[in-house]
């Protein structure tokens, strides 16, 4: 699949000249696809900076588009399968983000 700008959102911004922002991104793409250089192609335009955090949630078949879809019980077609925390290493001259490989967050239900 390809990067979907509508699935990227800023969660918080600490402000100031050396502040940082936290972002979420929902996708069905693999983690290695997401952290490929240039995947988030509009990072500069969106306001991403070096050092920002990006939480990536990976879904099985479709990215939720409403809060109701986020509350759907487990066992339905749309299941959260993985989550990663990435750091923005830099922004290219074209405005795309370069993300770290990501720290996996274990998803369990016991």
Image (cartoon, rainbow, N blue to C red):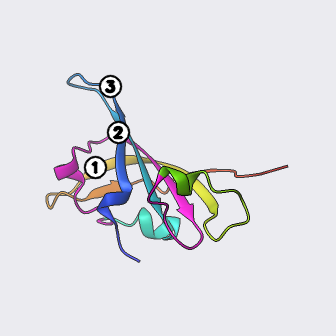
Q: Are marks 1 and 2 in contact (CB under 8 Å)?
A: no
User: CA separation, marks 2 and 3?
Assistant: 12 Å
Q: Going 34% across and 35% down the picture, which residue do you hit?
A: 21
The foreground one among 77 and 83 is: 77
User: CA separation, marks 3 and 1?
Assistant: 18 Å
Q: Going 60% across and 66% down the picture, which residue do you hit?
A: 78
Identify the secondary structure beneath mark 2: loop
* In the image: residue 69, left or right of residue 2: right
- Main secondary structure of the magenta stretch: loop
Mark 2 or 3: the one toward you:
3
Q: Going 69% across and 50% down the picture, which residue do you hit?
A: 106
In percent of width and height, residue 38 lies at: 29, 65
* In the image: residue 108, left or right of residue 101: right
Q: Which part of the image, by quadrant, shows the N terminus?
A: bottom left
Q: Are marks 2 and 3 in contact (CB under 8 Å)?
A: no
In the picture of the structure, the residue carrying the numbered disc 3 is 14
Identify the secondary structure beneath mark 1: strand
In the picture of the structure, the residue carrying the numbered disc 2 is 51
Upstream in sequence: badge 1 or badge 2: 2
Query: Neighbour class for label 3 at 10 Å: few (<14), some, many (≥20)?
Result: few
Q: Quadrant of residue 51?
A: top left
In the image, which residues are magenta? 38-66
């Amino acid at each position: 699949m390809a990067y979907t700008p509508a699935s990227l959102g800023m969660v918080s911004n600490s402000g100031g000249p050396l502040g940082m922002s936290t972002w979420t991104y929902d996708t069905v793409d693999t983690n290695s696809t997401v952290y490929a250089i240039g995947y988030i192609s509009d990072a500069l335009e969106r306001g991403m900076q070096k050092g920002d955090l990006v939480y990536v949630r990976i879904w099985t078949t479709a990215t939720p588009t409403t809060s109701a879809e986020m509350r759907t019980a487990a066992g339905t077609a749309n299941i959260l399968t993985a989550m990663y925390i990435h750091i923005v290493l830099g922004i290219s001259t074209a405005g795309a983000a370069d993300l770290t490989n990501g720290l996996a967050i274990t998803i369990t239900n016991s």
